[in-house]
Image: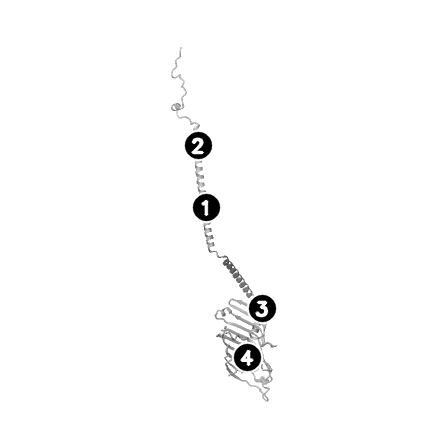
Amino acid sequence: MSEQTGPEDEQPKDQGPEQQGKGLGPLPPSDSEPHSANSFSKLSANTDSEQSDQSDESLNQAEDVTQDDQTNQSEAIAESKKQKKEKLQLPAALRLIAWLSRLMLMAVCLTLLAIVALLWRPPEYMLNWVAAFVENLLLDQTGLPLKIGRIAVLEVRPMHQRLVLENVYLYGHKDARLPFVVTPYANLETDLVAYFLGQPQVTMLELGSPQLRVIRDLEGRINFRPEFKPSDPNAPKGEPMDLPRAKLSIRDLVVLLRNESDDFRISDHVHVPHLNADLHDSNIADLYGLLRTDLFTFASKSQLQVYTGLGWATGKVASVDLDNINQYTRMVRGLNIQSGAFTGELWANWNDYSFQDLR
């Protein structure tokens, strides 16, 4: 007998995935789904990296292009400057002349600086050279020998020049044995730059305690006989040179007088406490002085035109004591002055240096 089985006893057959899904609900995720998600993320990362690489490459290319442009611009500017320089370049001969001119200018500047340095504080050998130059110049122009003991001060400044001499001996002629003027101190201050530029300036000459020796020999000649250098007779005669404004100041001047002729022998001295002179208006000199002797005191004022010799003088004389006059009047027999005093005024005029028309 065959057994009959119902539907409950029938074993279900294997069903496919679709049927199982339909009948049994959602299926568990399979192993293939995670693999697909990872692949998508990897693909996205690769895409981003490729885009970043491309952007970096584009930036690098832009920077390279910018640098190339700058380099090209610099080369273009340098090339244009080079072309301009080539256009402006002088010939070889002119370039040589330009370099020689520069070297000469540098040499002149260095020479001027050296001269300024020497004149600002001159050394001893330069002072000796200046003294010898002045002595030779005066001897050549006037025939008067000059001996300078030393140059104590030599200042050369742009607006001021000063020269201080010590122990100066001036002889009256070439054969003189005794000096005509001796001064232990002479100070000269001037401004040559202003004089040559035509600007107002004053030259100051100061002599301290000089001694003037005036001697008249047996032949009646004075011991001051300059021999001026003759000028060229063919040279055109121009106007006399405008002399600078100058002032002379002499303190404690002693004048030694000696007459060796037989007509009137005398040997005495005269003391001049001060003597001032002012040279103005190119050739006019005003002189003021005070003369003092054992017999009298004489205060004088005079004016002289330097080029022509025209001048005048006036003064007041006052005796101190006439007792000492007997030594001068002893040649007059029977004249004996015991005492007395006198005062008076003197004046004189002349037309030239010969004083022949003195009145």
| Residue in the foreground of this view, choosing between 111 and 199 | 111
Using the numbered discs, state the Cα–Cα distance from disc 4 to disc 1 in whole angstroms: 100 Å
Q: Nearer the viewer, mark 4 or mark 1?
A: 1
**Mark toward the start of the polypeptide (4 vs 3):** 3
Instruction: Report the amino acid beneath label 3.
Output: Trp
Residue 220 percent coordinates (x, y): 58, 82
Q: Is residue 107 above or below residue 351?
A: above
Question: Residue 291: which disc?
Answer: 4
Badge count: 4
Using the numbered discs, state the Cα–Cα distance from disc 4 to disc 3 in whole angstroms: 38 Å
**Mark toward the start of the polypeptide (4 vs 2):** 2
For image coordinates 43% across by 34% down, the residue present is 43
Question: Residue 68: which disc?
Answer: 1
* Residue under numbered circle 2: 39
Left or right of 82? Residue 262 is: right
For image coordinates 46% across by 46% down, the residue present is 68
* Residue under numbered circle 3: 129
**Mark toward the start of the polypeptide (1 vs 2):** 2
**Mark toward the start of the polypeptide (1 vs 3):** 1
Is the C-beta separation of discs 3 and 2 under 8 Å?
A: no
For this orientation, the residue located farthest to the top is: 1
